[in-house]
Amino acid sequence: MAGEGLIKRIGVGVPRRITIATTTLVKTGPGVLYRIIIGTTAAGAITVYDALTAASGAEKVVLKASISEGSYALGMVFQTGLTIVTGGASDITVIYG
């Protein structure tokens, strides 16, 4: 991804773009979810889990369907892993480390 090296160098985190309705295992093990950037108004709810699957973990954050474009700072620490469920085809970028 263009710019990923720059983001890593300045210590802001690693980006991961999600553009379809899906369950995405973003990272295994402990880390921090710094922010979620909404590129287009969310088509469905965006749910964040501290888990390796949505079925096995604790729900930590839910961003409602139709949340507006913008950057949402979270600073959420996770231990097991970072799983994101997008309920609709949204264009989001997850910044984590």
Image (spheres, rainbow, N blue to C red):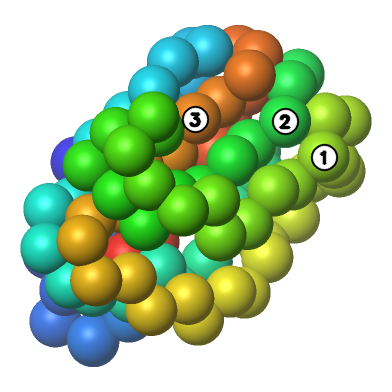
Outermost residue to the bottom: 10
Q: Give the quarter of the figure containing the N terminus.
A: top left
Say which residue label 1 marks. 64
Counting from the top left corner in percent of width and height, residue 74 is at 58, 74
What is the x, y in percent for residue 59?
Answer: 54, 51
Question: Of callouts 1 and 2, which one flags the residue occurring earlier in the amino acid sequence?
Answer: 2
Work out which quarter of the rendered image holds the C terminus and state it.
bottom left
Q: Residues within 10 Å of mark 2 (few under 14, many from 20)?
A: some
Indicate left or right for 26 with 34 as reference. Answer: left
Circles 2 and 3: CB atoms closer than 8 Å? yes
Q: CA–CA distance between discs 2 and 3?
A: 8 Å
Q: Mark 3 packing: few (<14 Cα in 10 Å), some, or many (20+)? A: many
Q: Report which residue position mark 3 lands on.
A: 85
In the displayed structure, would residue 60 be above or below residue 64? Answer: below
Mark 1, secondary structure of its residue: loop
Dot 2 or dot 3: first in sequence order is: 2
